[in-house]
């Protein structure tokens, strides 16, 4: 239930922004890796495909545990779940810096994936509880920026740290930042309400209802097909630029600009939904643009400036998708009790896409000897996403940003 009342020193909207800060701090752990890949390849001996798996392994927790974490959050409380996730991220990052081997990196990346999921999965439901209903679309547009915002910070800040030190220091910095955010959330976000109420569904009933919902699967599949493209392209941009002879700091700035464009798109989607734009139109426009941009960027011998502009547009217009899906996941959940598990299933399928995307693209690049066929893998994912959008729209008669009928 939303509340417009002020909570302590912060308004309800201010509390929602603190939830966003928790999401950003958790996503920093995903994006601390791309600028460090060249150093890890030299120091630890990672191959390109191994680097792809290290990029995607952070999604292992979300890929396997999304629905379960959604149920856990419903039972233990959304705020408590966020706090546990932030703690797990801090510990895993610190341990990864202490034990710098291939095996340790893989293990702690997987644990970071679990912590990331425990923070971002309850985020939308927690925001819904904190803010008035008439502000939800706009606030969800801001929430949708947590990954691109973290990407910009991690790529710029990470490149700066790496220019002066090594990747272990970057891991320690992320651990300290996340710990600070955890303390802030603990002190400021109101405690979870009691769940000991009559009428709350049993755990099995919540899971069963979610799994039997076609809407939940469709929303999750769309997110997965989108995420597979975005993380594969953005994650390997520093490597692509390095091969082109562009310095680490410059490559970091260029990649951060592309990621920042995605934040603009996610924010714009919230505003557009608030003003009545239809979810299907926003998502279809995004997928078509991503196909065209990938073809221009990788399908032809393009000068660096044209490749940059194309990838920038891919990220910018692609940003319309995440916010739209967060809003639809809340609206199309089978019941209020299944909102966390619906978002958990969506996160699970999104994580599956993020897990599969980088290794698939790396495999195509290795097989063909270059990046020129990258667009084939990403466009196939976009087409499948468009089919899911069509099914979701026809099933729910989605036409505008208002409540679906």
Image (spheres, helix red, strand yellow):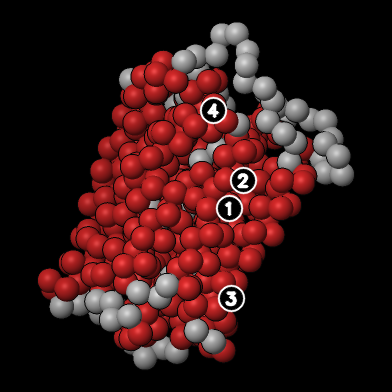
**First in sequence: mark 3 or mark 2?**
2
The residue that mark 3 highlights is 157
Residue 380 visible? The answer is yes
How much space separates mark 4 and mark 2, taking CA atoms? 14 Å
Indicate the position of residue 122 as horizontal and vertical percent values: 55, 38
Q: Position of 123 compared to 184: left or right?
A: left
The residue that mark 1 highlights is 87
Q: Position of 403 compared to 318: left or right?
A: right
Q: Quadrant of residue 38?
A: bottom left
The residue that mark 2 highlights is 83
Q: Position of 113 compared to 376: left or right?
A: right
Q: Which residue shows up at 31% across the image and 29% down it?
A: 391
The residue that mark 4 highlights is 74
Q: Is residue 340 above or below residue 99?
A: above
User: Which element carries disc 4, helix, strand or loop?
Assistant: helix
How much space separates mark 3 and mark 4, taking CA atoms? 35 Å
In the rendered image, the quadrant that contains the N terminus is: top right
User: Which element carries disc 3, helix, strand or loop?
Assistant: helix
How much space separates mark 1 and mark 2, taking CA atoms? 6 Å
Q: Is residue 373 above or below residue 271?
A: below
Q: Which residue shows up at 42% across the image and 54% down it?
A: 111
Q: How many residues crowd around disc 1 within 10 Å: few (fewer than 14), some, or many (20 or more)? A: some
Q: Which residue shows up at 45% across the image and 89% down it?
A: 247
Q: How many residues crowd around disc 2 within 10 Å: few (fewer than 14), some, or many (20 or more)? A: many
**First in sequence: mark 4 or mark 2?**
4
Q: Is residue 145 above or below residue 270?
A: below
**First in sequence: mark 1 or mark 4?**
4
Q: How many residues crowd around disc 3 within 10 Å: few (fewer than 14), some, or many (20 or more)? A: some
How much space separates mark 1 and mark 3, taking CA atoms? 22 Å
Which-is-in-front pick, marks 3 and 4? 4
How much space separates mark 1 and mark 4, taking CA atoms? 19 Å
Indicate the position of residue 256 as horizontal and vertical percent values: 52, 71
């Amino acid at each position: 239930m939303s509340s417009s009342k002020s909570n302590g020193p912060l308004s309800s909207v201010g509390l929602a922004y603190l939830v966003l800060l928790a999401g950003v701090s958790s996503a920093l752990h995903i994006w601390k890796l791309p600028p460090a890949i060249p150093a890890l390849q030299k120091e630890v001996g990672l191959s390109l495909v191994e680097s792809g798996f290290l990029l995607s392994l952070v999604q292992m927790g979300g890929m396997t545990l999304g629905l379960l974490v959604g149920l856990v959050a419903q039972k233990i409380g959304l705020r408590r779940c966020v706090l546990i996730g932030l703690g797990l991220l801090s510990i895993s990052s610190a341990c990864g810096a202490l034990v710098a081997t291939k095996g340790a990196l893989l293990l702690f990346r997987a644990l970071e994936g679990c912590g990331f999921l425990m923070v971002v999965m309850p985020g939308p439901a927690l925001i819904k509880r904190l803010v008035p209903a008439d502000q939800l679309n706009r606030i969800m547009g801001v929430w949708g920026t947590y990954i691109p915002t973290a990407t910009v910070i991690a790529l710029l800040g990470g490149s700066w740290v790496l220019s002066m030190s090594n990747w272990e220091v970057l891991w320690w910095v992320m651990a300290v930042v996340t710990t600070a955010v955890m303390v802030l959330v603990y002190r400021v976000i109101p405690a979870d309400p009691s769940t000991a109420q009559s009428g709350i569904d049993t755990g099995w009933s919540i899971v069963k209802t979610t799994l039997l919902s076609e809407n939940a699967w469709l929303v999750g599949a769309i997110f997965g097909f989108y995420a597979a493209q975005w993380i594969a392209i953005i994650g390997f941009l520093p490597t692509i630029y390095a091969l082109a002879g562009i310095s680490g700091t410059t490559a970091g700035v260029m990649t951060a600009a592309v990621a920042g464009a995605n934040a603009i798109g996610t924010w714009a989607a919230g505003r557009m939904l608030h003003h009545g734009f239809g979810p299907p139109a926003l998502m279809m426009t995004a997928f078509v643009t991503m196909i065209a941009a990938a073809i221009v960027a990788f399908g032809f011998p393009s000068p660096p400036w044209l490749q940059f502009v194309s990838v920038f547009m891919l990220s910018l217009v692609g940003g319309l998708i995440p916010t739209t899906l967060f809003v639809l996941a809340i609206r199309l959940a089978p019941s209020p009790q299944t909102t966390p598990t619906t978002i958990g299933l969506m996160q699970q399928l999104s994580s599956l896409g993020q897990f599969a995307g980088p290794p698939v693209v790396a495999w195509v690049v290795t097989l063909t000897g270059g990046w020129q066929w990258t667009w084939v893998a990403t466009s196939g994912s976009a087409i499948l996403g468009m089919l899911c959008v069509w099914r979701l729209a026809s099933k729910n008669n989605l036409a505008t940003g208002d409540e679906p009928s």
